[in-house]
Image (spheres, helix red, strand yellow):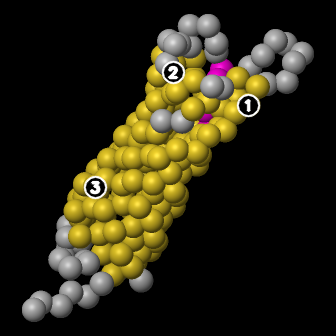
Amino acid sequence: MQVYAVDVRIEGGGGWAVGYVDAKGFDEGWGGGPSANAGIWIDKLFTDNLSLGLQYLYLSNTLSFSDVNDQHTRINAGMFNAAWRLNNGVVHPYVGAGIGFGVTNVSLPTEEDAPNEHDTATDVAGQVFFGFDYDILDNIYAGVNGRWFITDPELFGFDETVHQVALMGTIGYKF
């Protein structure tokens, strides 16, 4: 039986996300905004190329619809991820998927002097991601990744499907 030395690493990063919302009974809305992530990973589980991680995601968009502009959508998500990652060497390409939960908060503009309308919902979330990172030093790495994220909350009494496509830069530390 072969034994693998497990590595643990932490990382964080930020970038830009483009959101798309399909609300049943309404038209679709598009918009962009900042994104961020933080995570902890365990590498080389059972094989040199398996990595498992816990990740926090923040995705924020200002969306425009045909009848409403400036809908602000914020998602805070907790994800459990599995990735195939080339863990040996100095360049580490990877591809993976995750499942978790997303807390979606939506703020809708109202008439000029009225406060915005708000609603929040929590639902199952999923993502697929890919990217690479590069070892700058023995324990420090930097990289870039892309992801497609989806959740399906009920907001303001309507079933919505929220898609996010994000591009993020990351920096991490390997213990």
Q: Nearer the viewer, mark 2 or mark 3?
A: 2
Magenta-tinted stretch: 70-74
Mark 1 and mark 2: span between their CA atoms?
16 Å
Q: Name the residue under label 3.
A: 96
Q: 60 or 21, which lies in front?
A: 21
> Looking at the image, is mark 1 or mark 3 earlier in the sequence?
3
Q: Is residue 152 visible?
A: yes
Mark 1: secondary structure? strand
User: Where is the N terminus found, in terms of image quarters?
Assistant: bottom left
Q: Where is residue 32 in the image (x, y as percent from the top left)?
A: 52, 29
Q: Name the residue under label 2.
A: 23
Magenta span includes 21 = no
- Main SS of the magenta part reads strand
Mark 3: secondary structure? strand
> Do the residues bearing badges 1 and 3 touch, measured as CB atoms within 8 Å?
no
Mark 1 and mark 3: span between their CA atoms?
33 Å
